[in-house]
Amino acid sequence: MKTTNKKTNILITGAGLCGSLLGLRLAQRGYHVDILEKRPDMRKAVVDGGRSINLALSDRGLAGLKLVGLEEKVRELCIPMHGRLIHDVEGNTFASNYSGRDGEYINSISREELNKLLLDEADKYEDAHIDFDDAVTSVDLKNATVTYRDSETDTEKEWKADILLGTDGAGSVVRKAMMKQRDYLFSHSMNWLPHGYKELSIPPTDDGKWRIEKNFLHIWPRGGFMLIALPTGR
């Protein structure tokens, strides 16, 4: 990317954590950024799709958030997890630190609240524009063009950019287009795990206290399945 050309129009597909963070940083650098997101705005509507389980945010993730000036705001949403707390079948527990370095830990944070914060910050920049409820249906990589379904008119429209960046998740339409266009010499493989998962919640006690140790990532390993628990402030 030629950082001297601030008139470059950049189109990002997907306004999740990666897309919103990337769009925010590019807008801070002075680029014009458009982001297409197939889901509704999570700040205004309940979004059923995607993952709601908390993230385990490490120093590497915080470094990216520090780059856009959000490290302190994000830390206010975090609950430190100093290590893993393993639960065996007899009900015994033992702790396993993440590293041998003192003071190093990872953080539990709501994926949704972090995404909302990034969207709010991106909205502060005139050169960052996010369109929700617009699903990308096809991609022309050579021309940096996408076809998408406009939710307002229920018609297909085309969007041309100078640079196209795909941050549209596991089922990425951009990545599928890269796989089909062999002249890009793009190699990709995807293997789906034959497992599902169910989210449960452990409510606080009647007096508002934690039922299990707060500052750990809890793990119940059981062979063919396991349970994990992350602290959350919700």
Image (tube, helix red, strand yellow):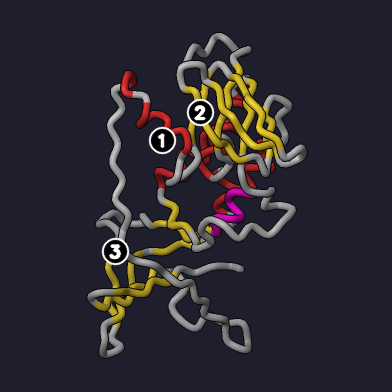
Quadrant the C terminus occupies: bottom right
Spatial CA span between label 2 and label 3: 45 Å
Residue at horizontal 65 percent and vertical 39 percent from the top: 134
Does 48 sit left or right of 97 as displayed?
Answer: right
- Disc ID at residue 176: 1
Task: Say which of 111 and 58 sits in front.
Answer: 111
Q: Which residues are magenta?
A: 110-116
- Disc ID at residue 97: 3
Residue at horizontal 30 percent and vertical 74 percent from the top: 225
Q: Which badge, 2 or 3, comes first in the chain's sequence?
A: 3
Task: Say which of 220 and 37 sits in front.
Answer: 37
Dominant SS of magenta comes to helix
**Could you tell me residue 203's position as x and y percent?**
56, 81
Is the residue 208 above or below the residue 104 in the image? Answer: below
Task: Say which of 185 and 87 sits in front.
Answer: 185
Q: Say whether marks 2 and 1 touch (CB < 8 Å).
A: yes
Q: Which badge, 3 or 1, comes first in the chain's sequence?
A: 3
Q: Secondary structure at mark 2?
A: strand
Residue at horizontal 56 percent and vertical 35 percent from the top: 68
Q: Which badge, 2 or 1, comes first in the chain's sequence?
A: 2
Does 191 sit left or right of 54 as displayed?
Answer: left
**Could you tell me residue 90's position as x and y percent?**
26, 90
Q: Which residue is mark 2?
A: 139
Spatial CA span between label 2 and label 1: 9 Å
Could you classify mark 1 by the number of other residues whose Cα lies within 10 Å: few (under 14), some (14-19), or many (20 or more)?
A: few
Q: Residue furthest top?
A: 4
